[in-house]
Amino acid sequence: MTRSITVLGATGSIGDSTLDLIRRNRDDWRVEVLTANGNTDKLAALAREFGAALAVCGDEGCLPALRAALAGSGIVAAGGEQALVEAAMRPVDMTVAAIVGCAGLAPVMAAAERGGTIALANKEALVAAGDVLMAAARQGGATLLPTDSEHNAIFQCLAGNRIEHVRSITLTASGGPLRTWSMEQLAAATPAQAVAHPNWDMGAKISVDSATMFNKGLELIEAWHLFPVGLDKLKIVVHPQSVIHSMVEYRDGSTLAQLGPSDMRVPIASCLAWPERMDTPCTPLDLAALGQLTFEAPDEQRFPATRLSRQAAEAGGAMPAVLNAANEVAVAAFLAGHLSFTRIAVIVEETMARYAPSAPAALAEVLAVDREARAQAQGLLETA
Ligand code: NAD
Ligand code: MG
């Protein structure tokens, strides 16, 4: 049976992995919408290849280029933030949410309110909107399938079990490329060094997040919303080989883990095929060749991000949205060469310290908090 699919963020790393799987199973899927931000050449080429009905660029200024690139194809072109939201509202069987950052929130909310099945990679949307997004998904009758490898692992380890029987959930973290660096070395880390992840090939923003450990912090908040066991039952362990993607411990002492190659096509395939399974071209695990799996506690002195993220979750309300917004601003500044690596966490902590408690109840309020926190963080960058 052919199913329809929309890929939000089709030109990125998760988009590439998703479309690779669709390409190998062309007859199973009808592509409805593909979106990007400004990379109109790649978007148009993908829209033509997959026969999409609609292609949308988030950057409205790129619409003329997208129209030109799609001329004669019969594919409708659209541009701008509202066009992304309208695209996400079109009924499809599966929406892959793979825009990076809070920019993906409004389209994810639209998909959640419509009530389809959403493969959620865009963790910043869930971190920023938290309860608002979860409530929209519940009310819309949407199914959220966690695509982030850790959350997909937990989702798989929970299948067939009751959440009340969970004693703890452990998120594994690779520790990133700078895991063993001293504070002095970290202060001098360059963008090229920070994005050179040892195990995963990802977009620039999440690669920096992996190096700072904000990725794990965001994932802690993501897990807190997806799996309601309480913050105190969520743990983090550093596991540099990225073979165990996360674990669930039950009251009887059984710990279930999900293992796999560090290739996002595995968790994406798990979402695309759910509740069935599908083939992937990924190299199977060879445990004998790997030899050893190792574990260590996170070092929150050198990498304060997980501590700050736990604090943000404990504070609740809009604090996780503030943390996320400040991190997005700081990471962009770091990638542009305007901020040192170790100052990313400082900017986040200082922005959080300026937070006036609020509990957003709707998308517009979350977006207002996001804008305000960005302005705060930007101000801190400029006065630093
Ligand atoms: P990426 O930078 O490679 O791709 C991001 C996509 O979002 C691109 O298609 C880009 O055009 C689009 N985009 C960026 N800014 C936009 C905007 N303002 N408006 C509209 N579209 C915009 O990122 P990625 O690595 O594919 O990550 C995507 C999401 O998935 C992130 O939230 C990330 O945390 C999450 N994730 C990624 C991986 C991975 O392995 N790459 C793993 C787990 C989770
Ligand atoms: Mg992850």
Image (cartoon, grey):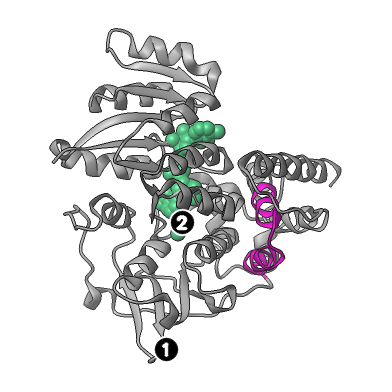
Which residue, given by chain and number where applicable, does mark 2 sit on?
A: 197
Disc 1 element: loop
Q: Locate residue 378: give its quadrant.
A: top right
Query: The magenta stretch spans which residues?
Result: 302-326
Mark 1 is surrounded, within 10 Å at the Cα level, by few (under 14), some (14 to 19) or many (20 or more) other residues, namely: few
Q: Read off the residue under disc 1.
A: 251
Name the quadrant containing residue 250. bottom left
Q: Is residue 39 above or below residue 67?
A: below
Q: Main secondary structure of the magenta part?
A: helix
Task: Give the percent coordinates (x, y) of residue 381.
Answer: 78, 44
Q: Secondary structure at mark 2?
A: loop
Q: For residue 316: magenta?
A: yes
Farthest residue, direction bottom = 252
Q: Is residue 39 left or right of residue 52?
A: right
The percent position of residue 21, horizontal first and vertical second, equals 23, 44
Q: What's the residue type where badge 1 is placed?
A: Arg
**Residue 75, horizontal then vertical, whole percent:** 31, 16
Question: Mark 2 or 1 closer to N-term?
Answer: 2
Real-space Cα separation, disc 2 to disc 1, in angstroms: 35 Å
